[in-house]
Image: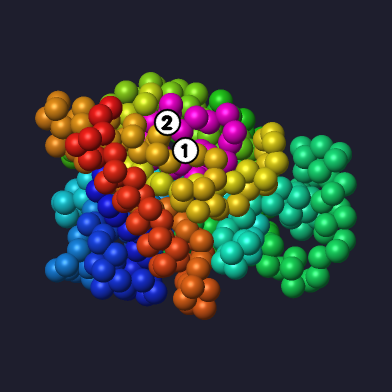
Amino acid sequence: MRQTWRWFGPHDLTSVDDMRQAGVEGVVSALHHIPTGAVWTGEEIAKRQAALAPHLAWEVVESLPVSEDIKKQKGDWRTHIANYKTSLQNLADKGLETICYNFMPVLDWTRTDLAFRVPHGGTCMRFDLIDFAAFDIHILQRPAAASDFGPDVATQAAERFAGMTEDRKRELARNVTMGLPGSTESMSIPDVRRHLAEYDNLDADRLRRHFIDFLEEVVPTAERLGMRLCCHPDDPPFPLLGLPRIMSSAADYRAVLDAVDSPANGMTLCSGSLGARPDNDLPAIMREFAPKVHFLHLRNVTLEEPGMPASFHEAEHLGGGTDMVALIAEVLREEARRKAEGRRDHQIPMRPDHGQDIIDDLNRKGQPGYPTIGRLKGLAELRGIMTALSHPAVTF
């Protein structure tokens, strides 16, 4: 695997020198300052590349976001698709080939707590189902929310909300609506309500049809340019706010990858996002979709109760519910197969995703989920597994 690191640009508290000292081989980044739906110009792409040169290179784009208009097929969605294809061309002109994105409606990755205290004294991100229900029912005041959660969760949410301070209510709303990591765009409560109203009770089948329509437009461009598009799974991998989420399981990926069957249409396998759903077997998912896995996010989560949806928190990389050794073994098998086949992309880029805030991270106030030392610890652990499984004494 090629060891990469997510970097949010020159303002990121993790410097280029920090990444070099961590042994990073390539960088994952995006132009977060450009509004969703607008064109990424060659000039802006070159600026990001120059900020990393001469020691590191921008190798994976995460994310080139898909606009809400495209997901809903409303407003400027056709213009946004045209702009997306232009951005792909501009990225390819600068040598970038791997493009991560997602198709989550309204909310992207969603957490209720960005600094949940764990027993060793560090902190991590957490999704608390009761807190989220309190947000949905009592802060957002979505009409059907209480019935969607059921009486038991709704009762607990009412009790939780009644005990919240005004500061906690504001913090919870901010945490839930903060948007993509690194993005300069966030939503207010009225923004969320407006987006929900515009989805017009859009169901899973229709949202999937819109996704396939998008792929039928952009995948031929990506294939012509020699690029690899890789969709990130839903995070968390279950419906939120009464909206469907359609990239949460192996069956979801199977439907979309089969509908637009191209080497340019692939998967970002995020072990943390998919691992927040108990019926997802991560080694088996890697095994099934191996030829189309173009990017890896390696992290772990601990489910706090049985069933789905459930509360969970970000675990240490070798903790949680995913067998990381078994997953990495499947990745190395696929890389060996690709190499024997002569594939140019036989080395799959991976990054240590998220991480617990530990030691100096606790006072740095960095990007939530992206602590320098916590991710370095995770990268070292993952590197240890990779090294051990690659030893000549180990056979597959």
Residue 136 percent across, percent down from the top left? 74, 51
Q: Which residue is mark 1?
A: 323
- For the image, the number of numbered tags is 2
* Name of the residue lying farthest toward the left: 342
Q: Which quadrant would the C terminus be assigned to in this image?
A: top left
Image point (68%, 67%), residue name: 171
Q: Amino acid at mark 1?
A: Asp
In the rendered image, the quadrant that contains the N terminus is top left
- Marks 2/1: CA–CA distance: 8 Å
The residue that disc 2 covers is: 283
Q: Is residue 92 magenta?
A: no
Spot occupied by residue 57 in the image (x, y as percentages of width and height): 20, 60
Amino acid at pointer 2: Pro
Q: Quadrant of residue 263?
A: top left
Mark with earlier residue (2, 1):
2
Q: Could you tell me residue 351's position as x and y percent?
A: 35, 52
Q: Residue at x 59, y 33 (%)?
A: 278
The image quarter in which residue 14 lies? bottom left
- The answer to whether mark 2 and mark 1 are in CB contact below 8 A is yes
Residue 6 placement (x, y as % from top left):
35, 59
Residue 272 magenta-highlighted? yes
| Placement of 362 over or under 327, stated as above or below | below
- Residue 312: in sight, yes or no? yes
Question: Element at badge 2?
Answer: helix
Q: State left or right for residue 91 relative to residue 212.
A: left
Q: Which residues are magenta?
A: 267-286
Look at the picture and state if 140 lies above or below 33: above
Farthest bottom residue in view: 363
Residue lying at 29% horizontally and 54% vertically, measured from the top left:
4
